[in-house]
Image (tube, rainbow, N blue to C red):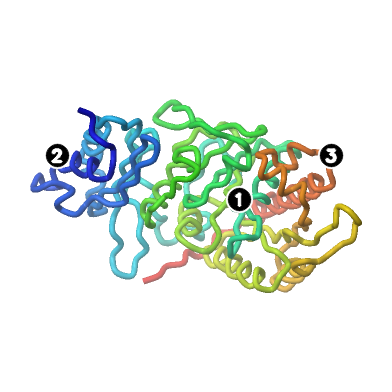
C-alpha cells in the first residue's frame, strides 16, 4: 500500500539514518529541519558541526536515498547546515544539488588580507562580469527593471544571463513566460533555461508557483550558492542577479562569495523609497562592492488618453539622491501600462516591443550600466576586508 507523502512520512523514513556518531537517528537527535514538500520534490536540512561537513557527506547521501525510495518522490535535495556560533552569521556547511546529487561545499570566506568582501569570491566559470540589482524595499518594480536591464544588455550585443536570487518570491519564470524544470547537465550541474535569449535560473523552476519556500538563512544561502555555481551558464559577458529586497542573508552571501563587478540600486522618486535605497547603497559600500548607480523607476506617469503627465510618486528624487551620494544616475523609467502588461504576460517590453520609447529607455540604462562596469573593472583596487568579532 502506498504511503501518503507528507512531513510525517519523510521523518519516519529519516529515522532509519543513524546519527553522526552512529548513535540514535538524525530525527530523534533533532538534526532534521526545514522539511519542504512540493510537487514530488523534497527539501530538508541536517544540522551538523561545520568541521565535520566533509566527513558526514555519506550521512547526507544516505538521508537523500531513504527519502528518494518513498512513493511519490521525484527528486530530493538535502543540505548539511551548521548552526551559527554566538555572534556569528549562519552559514551552509554543504549543499546538495537541486537534482538530488551531491555537491561541493559552499566556498569559505577569504582569509584576512585579501581584497574587500565584494571582490574576494571565486568567479563563476564562463561568466566575465556579475552585477547585482537591488532595492532597499519591496514594491519598487526591481524585478521588472532587472529583467529589462538584462534584455537591454543583450540587445546592446552582450551575452547575458539573469539569476533570480529571491528565494522566497521568485518572479523570473512569470516575467519571462518560462515553465518546466532545467535539464541535468554534465558534472552534476543544471543547464540554465533560455528566455528571449537570456540564460535564466530561478528557484521558481524548482518549486511550484504557489508553493511557499519556508527556509531559514542556511538553506537560503546554500540554495543561492547552488543556483550560481552548479549551473552551466555557458559563456556570458555579464550575469545580472535580481536580489531580494532589503539587506539580509542573500545580499551578504553574494557580497561574500561572488566577485561582484558592482550593484545597481532601484528606487522610486518618493522620499520613503529613497530612504531605503540609501540603506541598500550603504550596505554594498560597507562590503566593498562598487555602486554602479541608481535607477529611478515609476518616475512619472503619462496618461494614455490625454497625454498629461503626472508625477504620482514625485519626480527627480533618485537623481538628486545620486548626486548627493556621489554615484551615477543611470536613468529613469516611467510608470506605464505597457511595461506592466508585457511583464504580467511574460513578454518584457525590451523583447516584445523593442522599438518603443520604453525599450529604448532600458537600452540606454543598460549602456550606462555597462560603461560603469567597465570603469569599475579598470579602477578596481585592493580594499581592506571588514572583520567583525
Q: Quadrant of the C terminus?
A: bottom left
Q: CA distance from mark 3 to mark 2?
A: 61 Å
Can you tell which quarter of the image residue 328 is in? Answer: bottom right
**Mark number, residue 131:** 1
At 41% from the left and 61% from the top, the residue drawn is: 112
Residue at screen point 70% across, 61% down = 294
Task: Quickly name the residue at label 2.
Answer: 16
Of all residues shown, which one is farthest toward the front?
1
* Label 3 with label 2: CB-CB less than 8 Å: no
Figure check: 107 above or below 316: above
The residue that appears at 68% across and 63% down in the rendered structure is: 267
* Local crowd size for mark 2, using a 10 Å CA cut-off: few (<14), some (14–19), many (≥20): some
Using a 10 Å C-alpha cutoff, classify the residue at mark 1 as few (fewer than 14 neighbours), some (14 to 19) or many (20 or more): many
**Residue 121 spot, x, y in % from top left:** 48, 51
Residue at x 66%, y 35% (from the top left corner):
159
Where disc 3 sits, the SS reads loop
CA separation in Å, label 3 and label 1: 26 Å
Q: Is residue 13 left or right of residue 191?
A: left
* Picture coordinates of residue 271, whole percent (x, y): 69, 73
Q: Secondary structure at mark 2?
A: loop
Residue at label 3? 355
> Is there any visible trace of residue 128 in the rendered image?
no
Based on the displayed image, in which of its 4 quarters is residue 345 positioned? top right
341, 202: nearer the viewer: 341
Amino acid at each position: 500500500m502506498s504511503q501518503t507523502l507528507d512531513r510525517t512520512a519523510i521523518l519516519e523514513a529519516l529515522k532509519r539514518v543513524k546519527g553522526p556518531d552512529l548513535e540514535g537517528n538524525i530525527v530523534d537527535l533533532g538534526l532534521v529541519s526545514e522539511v519542504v514538500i512540493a510537487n514530488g520534490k523534497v527539501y530538508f536540512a541536517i544540522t551538523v558541526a561545520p568541521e565535520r561537513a566533509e566527513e558526514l557527506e555519506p550521512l547526507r547521501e544516505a538521508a537523500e536515498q531513504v527519502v528518494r525510495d518513498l512513493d511519490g518522490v521525484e527528486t530530493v535535495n538535502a543540505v548539511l547546515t551548521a548552526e551559527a556560533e554566538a555572534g556569528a552569521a549562519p552559514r551552509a556547511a554543504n549543499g546538495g544539488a537541486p537534482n538530488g546529487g551531491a555537491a561541493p561545499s559552499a566556498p569559505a570566506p577569504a582569509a584576512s588580507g585579501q581584497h574587500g568582501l565584494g571582490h574576494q569570491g571565486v568567479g563563476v566559470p564562463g561568466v566575465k562580469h556579475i552585477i547585482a540589482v537591488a532595492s532597499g524595499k519591496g514594491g519598487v518594480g526591481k524585478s521588472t527593471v532587472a529583467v529589462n536591464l538584462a534584455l537591454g544588455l543583450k540587445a546592446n550585443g552582450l551575452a547575458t544571463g539573469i539569476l533570480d536570487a529571491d528565494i522566497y518570491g521568485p518572479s523570473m519564470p512569470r516575467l519571462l513566460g518560462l515553465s518546466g524544470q532545467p535539464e541535468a547537465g554534465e558534472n552534476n550541474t543544471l543547464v540554465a533555461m533560455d528566455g528571449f535569449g537570456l540564460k535564466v535560473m530561478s528557484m521558481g523552476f524548482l518549486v511550484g508557483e504557489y508553493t511557499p519556500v519556508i527556509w531559514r538563512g542556511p538553506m537560503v544561502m546554500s540554495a543561492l550558492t547552488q543556483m550560481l555555481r552548479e549551473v552551466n551558464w555557458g559563456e556570458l559577458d555579464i550575469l545580472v542577479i535580481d536580489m531580494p529586497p532589503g539587506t539580509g542573508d542573500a545580499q551578504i552571501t553574494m557580497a561574500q562569495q561572488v566577485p561582484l563587478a558592482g550593484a545597481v540600486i532601484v528606487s522610486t522618486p518618493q522620499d520613503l523609497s529613497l530612504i531605503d535605497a540609501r540603506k541598500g547603497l550603504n550596505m554594498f559600500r560597507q562590503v566593498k562592492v562598487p555602486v554602479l548607480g541608481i535607477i529611478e523607476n515609476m518616475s512619472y506617469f503619462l496618461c494614455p488618453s490625454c497625454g498629461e503627465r503626472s508625477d504620482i510618486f514625485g519626480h527627480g528624487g533618485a537623481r538628486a539622491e545620486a548626486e548627493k551620494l556621489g554615484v551615477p544616475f543611470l536613468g529613469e523609467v516611467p510608470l506605464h501600462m505597457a511595461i506592466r502588461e508585457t511583464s504580467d504576460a511574460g513578454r518584457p517590453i525590451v523583447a516584445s516591443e523593442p522599438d518603443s520609447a520604453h525599450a529604448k529607455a532600458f537600452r540606454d540604462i543598460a549602456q550606462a550600466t555597462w560603461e560603469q562596469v567597465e570603469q569599475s573593472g579598470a579602477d578596481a583596487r585592493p580594499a581592506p576586508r571588514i572583520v567583525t568579532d
